Amino acid sequence: MEVEEAPGELVNAGKSEAEAEYHSHDFEWEDLKAEVESDPSLSYHLSPFPDPAASTPSPPQPSSDAWRSFHRRHASGKFFKERRYLLKEFPELPNSTDCAKILEVGCGNGSTAVSILRSSESITVFACDCSKDTLEKANEVISNTKGIDIKDRFHPFLMDVSRENFPDWLFCSACRSSHDPSHHKMRKEHPDFLRENQCCVGGMDFVTMIFTLSAIPFAIMPSTIEQCVSVLKPGGLFLFRDYGLYDMTMLRFLPHQRVGFREYMRSDGTLSYFFTLDTVRELFRAAGLIELELEYCCVKSVNRKNRKKMQRVWVHGKFQKPPS
């Protein structure tokens, strides 16, 4: 379910696209906060949202169908660009050894996975998405990328992370230090790449969630993170990047598109939530993770078509599952 608003149309102000520093501090988030909060025309973004229990409209529901339609509309893959910058922001990925296993949650068309696979021949990527079409596109994109041999290194699988548990073959209950039951439906597929006597792949060294969590209703985020943590090995890393509060995308939403506090719905039915550092910190700590890095990424960008300057805000986070 990954999406990043038209990255191909944006370049870092005063730099070429190849030199753009995506994880940087072109401006201070506190300065942007003061600017937004002093603008009366943007005050509706700041007002409390009615309690769903006391309001007529029902709270937003998981938008898997909307995201599947979204990916069908952008099947050409031109909407996304390869995210090579993530290797600089998360150097643990290219520097990993001992045949690291990575789970990418909400892989989209492979714009993150292709960079990870290119960085090291010892990495294996397991990638899930709620859209069959986009998984097929991801497999096609990565299979046709020069310099990458994906044999036994890229394993996409269909799954709606907001509604289902991860399959047992990622990290079976017998191999986990603990097993927490949940309301999600269990999945018991046994893929062909497992050896006959192999119960599972033994858990993940990394979980990446890049512009994915914001597409899930806020009320479901805690259980979604918890089940991601359940397939992460003790000591493994959870790498996170998503929309930050007061990002340009948020400020373009109209009042009627608000469906929750800091939560919006696009005209196509897809959701977008905008995070503060405190919100991310609370979500991941509640799932039992240790905070290693957490900060705003504030980037000034320029639209190539109209040369309009824009201020982008993302949240960059790195968390660790406690060693057993």
Image (cartoon, rainbow, N blue to C red):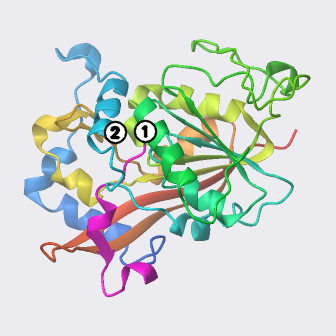
Q: Could you tell me which residue is drawn at 31 percent across and 87 percent down?
A: 14
Q: Quadrant of residue 91?
A: bottom right
Residue 179, placed above or below residue 155? above
Residue 58: x and y in percent read 24, 16
Which sits in the foreground, 310 or 284? 310
The circle on residue 134 is 1
- Give the residue at mark 2: 71
Between marks 1 and 2, how big is the CA–CA gap?
6 Å
Q: Is residue 185 visible?
A: yes
Q: Nearer the viewer, residue 149 or 245?
A: 149
Foreground residue among 209 and 94: 94
Q: How many discs appear?
A: 2
Residue 290 at x, y = what percent? 70, 48
- Find out whether the residues at labels 1 and 2 contact each other: C-beta distance under 8 Å: yes
Q: 10 Å neighbourhood of mark 1: few (<14), some, or many (≥20)?
A: many
Give the magenta part as a residue range. 2-19
Secondary structure of residue under mark 2: helix
Of the two numbered discs 1 and 2 on the same chain, state the one appearing first in sequence. 2
Q: Secondary structure at mark 1?
A: helix
> Which of the 4 image quadrants contains residue 181?
top right
Dot 2 amino acid type: His
- Residue 12's place in the image compared with 205, above or below, is below
* Residue beneath the point at 50% across and 47% down: 140
Q: Position of residue 50 (x, y in %)?
A: 22, 26
